[in-house]
Image (spheres, rainbow, N blue to C red):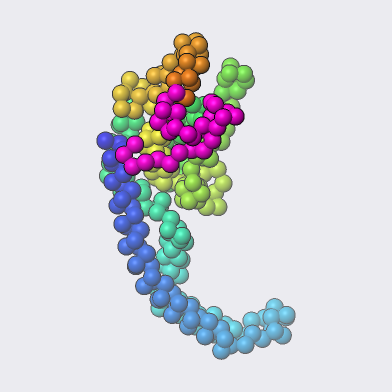
Amino acid sequence: MLSKRMARHGKRTQEELAALEQRHKAFTEQLLVAYRDVLTVLKDHVVDELADRTGQVSLADALAVKRIREVVETGGGFDAQLAEIEALAAYRGGNWTPLVERFLRPGRPTMFKLAHTLTFVPTFRDRSVPDALEHALAHQHLTRELVSDTIVVPTGAAGSGGPEPGRLDLSFASQQWRTTVCAKNRPGMLVRRHFEAMVFTYLVEELRCGDIAVAGAEDFGDWTAMLLPWERVGSQIPLFCEQAIRSCRTRWPGTWSPRSPTAPASAPPRQPGT
């Protein structure tokens, strides 16, 4: 259910991005017209350098600034245009990540309930995604826009020391996601709703590739638990290699070099249906 839900969100996000790009093209044309007028006003008024050096503002400069403000207000106002410019910058370069949380929002309670119910375990040493999930779960109840990226980590050998504050490792995320998640002009702070969307996106990806497993599950179980111990298979490796070589010689005769009877001289082309 988690994988299907996130896949559906990803598809809807791409569709929404395409629609936004179409709308932003029209708005970009309006911006060009508005700022063409701004440049025209500035061009028609020569700055009085003498007044500037004496710290005085000439009447022509004051009128120019007034006309500029009128042009901007006519085009929608400073706040509205700045907000739209920020939106354009966020989606620049096909960045779809700011849209994910919009589609995740209706199913957010279900996603968190599922995360609380299941036990996710990493199948190798990298714990960056599980740590990010724990950080999101710890701040689930908050409603404020930003959350800190500070976490409590153990110190000392094998985690035997006391806890100390540390920074959340976001190296698993792409540059687009980090740009969306990290708050602008607020170092060490994360945009909570985007951070949650990023965590669930990468959680599903880690489950698909097997880097994270669900304890007790069959479909997303820990594949490392299915591996045979080395003590059991180590003595059988020579026999396995001998059987593999014999099978390759039978299947692809003439592809084995006389100088190296245990290695193919060249990889045979794969035939259709083989």
Q: Is residue 177 left or right of residue 56?
A: left
Q: Nearer the viewer, residue 203 or 231?
A: 231
Give the image location of residue 122, x and y in percent: 45, 27
Q: Nearer the viewer, residue 128 or 36?
A: 128
Residue at 30 percent of width and 31 percent of height: 113
Q: Is residue 273 found inside the magenta-colored segment of the image?
A: yes
Give the image location of residue 214, x and y in percent: 36, 26
Q: Is residue 192 found inside the magenta-colored segment of the image?
A: no
In the rendered image, which quarter is residue 248 located in? top left
In the rendered image, which quarter is residue 77 located in? bottom left
Read off the magenta span. 246-274
Residue at 72 percent of width and 80 percent of height: 53
In the rendered image, which quarter is residue 116 located in? top left
Residue 149 seen anywhere in this rendered image of the structure: no
In which quadrant of the rendered image does the C terminus lie? top left
161 versus 40 height, above or below: above
Give the image location of residue 158, x and y in percent: 58, 18
Give the image location of residue 119, x and y in percent: 36, 24
36 versus 81 height, above or below: below
Report the magenta stretch's main SS: loop
Residue at 40 percent of width and 31 percent of height: 251
Residue 215 seen anywhere in this rendered image of the structure: yes
34 versus 97 height, above or below: below
Residue at 35 percent of width and 58 percent of height: 17
In which quadrant of the rendered image does the N terminus lie? top left
Give the total of numbered labels.
0
Q: Nearer the viewer, residue 168 or 70?
A: 168
